[in-house]
Image (cartoon, rainbow, N blue to C red):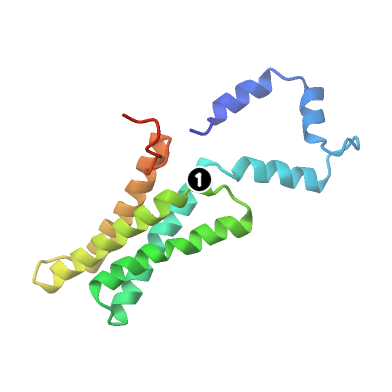
Amino acid sequence: MLPTMKEGARKLESKTPDEIFRRLDVDVSGSIDSFELISLVQGRFHNSWEMYTIDTAALAAVTVAGVHGAISMGLHPLVAATSGMVMSLGGVLRDLFCGRDLAMASQSYAIATGAGSTVYVLTREMALRGYPLLAMTRIFLSMGTTVSIRCWEYFRGEPLLAPMRGRK
């Protein structure tokens, strides 16, 4: 699990201002330039809970949009459900191109989008068969499933599909 802000503040309190400045002044120029400030901000948000939250919300929205788009094109419900899962590849590619840590999200991407898109397809099929499910209910259930799986993985502190080696 990522360190909390209070833990980070406690570590900073134990350092002198000179030690903090030396750590920030990477090129040892005696001043902190824009490159060093950008590195500081990117380092703070690179694998933070804020970034994970934004990423999860975007993933949930893209899951619903993707599966709805597949259904509106007339694709079979099974194909529509898997199209939501295939869309998670875009998030993994983004992580690769942006230099982000793939371990942060890559396993739960496919599981969360697969579950969210399956919930959307199942609730749509129920609505078509006469159950009173509004479109907004289907959307919230699908997004809620996606967000719940991602939150469960985040608070658990390890990937959903942990390696089997060493387990009994």
Spot occupied by residue 107 in the image (x, y as percentages of width and height): 42, 50
Q: Quadrant of residue 57?
A: bottom left
Q: Residue at x 36, y 58 (%)?
A: 113
Left or right: 120, with 12 as reference point: left
The vertical placement of 150 against 25, above or below, is below
Among the 4 quarters of the image, the one containing residue 43: top right
For mark 1, what is the residue?
104
Q: Position of residue 77 (x, y in %)?
A: 24, 72
Say if 106 sits above or below 30 in the image: below
Task: Determine the secondary structure under disc 1.
Answer: helix
User: Which residue does the image show at 50% across and 41% down from the upper left?
Assistant: 49
Q: Quick one: which residue is furthest to the bottom in this view?
A: 74
Q: Is residue 11 above or below residue 42?
A: above
Q: Residue furthest right?
A: 29
Give whichever of 107, 84 is nearer the camera. 107
Q: Residue furthest top?
A: 14
The total number of labels drawn is 1
Q: Left or right: where does residue 101 sit relative to residue 120?
A: right
Q: Is residue 63 above or below residue 104?
A: below
Q: Left or right: 4 with respect to 148?
A: right
Q: Amino acid at mark 1?
A: Met
Identify the residue at horizontal 88%, vertical 35% (top origin): 28
> Which quadrant holds the C terminus?
top left
Mark 1 crowd level (few <14, some 14–19, many ≥20, 10 Å Cα): some
Residue at the (32%, 72%) spot, across then down: 68
**In x, y percent, where is residue 101?**
57, 47
Residue 158 screen position, x and y as percent: 42, 37
